[in-house]
Amino acid sequence: MGKWNKIGYFKAIIVALAAIMNIYVPLEQEPEVGFAALTLPPFLMGVIGIPFIFRNDVDASTKQRMKPTWNDSIFRIKRPLSTVSFGGYFFLFVGFSSLIGAALKSQEIHKISLSVMMFGVGILIGVWIVFKRKK
C-alpha cells in the first residue's frame, strides 16, 4: 500500500471515527424488508453503476486512467474515482462496524448494516471493474 501522507492519515481517521461511533451506537430499528431487498440493490448499484458512470473517465492532464490511491485527495475534481473509492471504503467499514456493534449489543445481525456494507463492497468492485475493462 505504500507510505501514507497527511491526506491518507486524515482519511483513515475519518473512517476510524465513523466506525467507532457505529460500534458503540448501532442502529436500533430493523426495517421490515427482506434480506435480498436490502442488500442486492446497493451492491448492484455499485457494481453496475460505477463502471457505467466512469466508463470514459480519464485524467485531464495525462489522458490516461489513473488508479486511485489512498493518499489521493478526495476533493480533487481531476480524479473523481479517488472520492468514489474512499466512499466505498467508508461504507464498507461503517457497515462492518455497525454490524459488530449490533452483534455486541443485541446479539443480532442487522440487515441495514449489511446493506451499507454491501454498498461499499459494490463500489469497490465497480472501481476495480473500471480498471479491468479495456478502453
Image (spheres, helix red, strand yellow):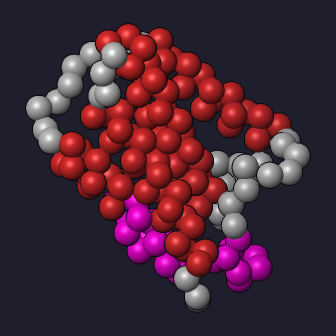
Foreground pick, 107 / 51: 107
Q: How many marks?
A: 0
Residue 29, image x and y in percent? 22, 20
Residue 82, image x and y in percent? 63, 56
Mark yes or no: residue 134 visible.
Answer: yes
Task: Name the residue: 32% across, 12% down.
Answer: 106
Q: Which residues are magenta?
A: 45-66
Task: Name the residue: 48% across, 18% down.
Answer: 23
Residue 135, image x and y in percent? 58, 89
Residue 31, image x and y in percent? 17, 30
Question: Is residue 135 covered in magenta?
Answer: no
Mark yes or no: residue 80 visible.
Answer: no
Task: Name the residue: 70% across, 81% down.
Answer: 64
80 left or right of 95? right
Question: Is residue 46 covered in magenta?
Answer: yes
28 left or right of 15? left
Foreground pick, 16 / 111: 111
Say if 102 sits above or below 7 in the image: above
Foreground pick, 80 / 94: 94
Task: Name the residue: 69% across, 34% down.
Answer: 12
